[in-house]
Image: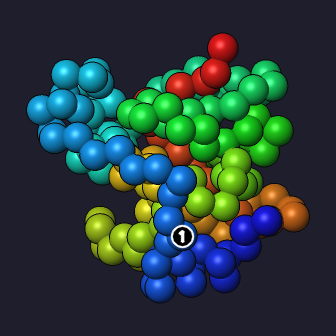
Amino acid sequence: MHHWTDVISRAQLGNPAPDRRIEKTPDEWRKQLTAEQFRVTRLAGTERAFSSAMCSLFEPGRYRCVCCGTELFDAANKFQSGSGWPSFTQPLSDNVVAYFSDGSHGMQRIETRCNVCAAHLGHVFPDGPPPSRLRYCINAVALEKEK
């Protein structure tokens, strides 16, 4: 289980290697993704809060990276944060999410990216529920729910 100290350490010292890597050119990503998915995942954008029904979706299953299909989160770790974005307490496994310091917009935050394809997912905060106390605040357009 990850804790805030683990997140900070990885953002400062580096992330574990993923099981595989996927690299594509911006043009290849543009052909694969919608304009909004590209803006969020490849250009580190943010979707509008409360713009996705995924925030209130709590059925069992897993959530994959929309870019590469890597399983990132399990619905068992999803919770209603009221933030306007899908929120999780833990990634599915130790090396699927990467952490980076983000000083954009005059704030100090920890950005989360898919560790396989470097897609921007969102941010993680230390204000989630027990036991991890983490809140992975993830853009819904960066995810696809397994059917």
Count of picture labels: 1
* Residue annotated with mark 1: 16
Q: Residue at x 54, y 70 (%)?
A: 16
What element does badge 1 sit on?
A: loop
User: For the residue marked with disc 1, what is the amino acid?
Assistant: Pro
Task: Relative to 5, say whether 119 is above or below.
Answer: above
Q: Residue furthest front?
A: 20
Picture quadrant of residue 32: top left
Picture quadrant of residue 68: top left
Q: Which residue is drawn at 30% across and 50% down?
A: 44
Q: Where is residue 56 in the image (x, y as percent from the top left)?
A: 69, 26
Q: In which quarter of the image is the C terminus?
A: top right
Task: Relative to 119, say whether 32 is above or below.
Answer: above
| In-front residue for pair 132/91 | 91
Q: Where is residue 95 in the image (x, y as percent from the top left)?
A: 59, 60
Q: In which quarter of the image is the N terminus?
A: bottom right
Specify few, some or many for label 1: CA neighbours under 10 Å numbering under 14, 14-19, or 20 or more.
few
Whether residue 2 is visible: yes
| In-front residue for pair 119/139 | 119
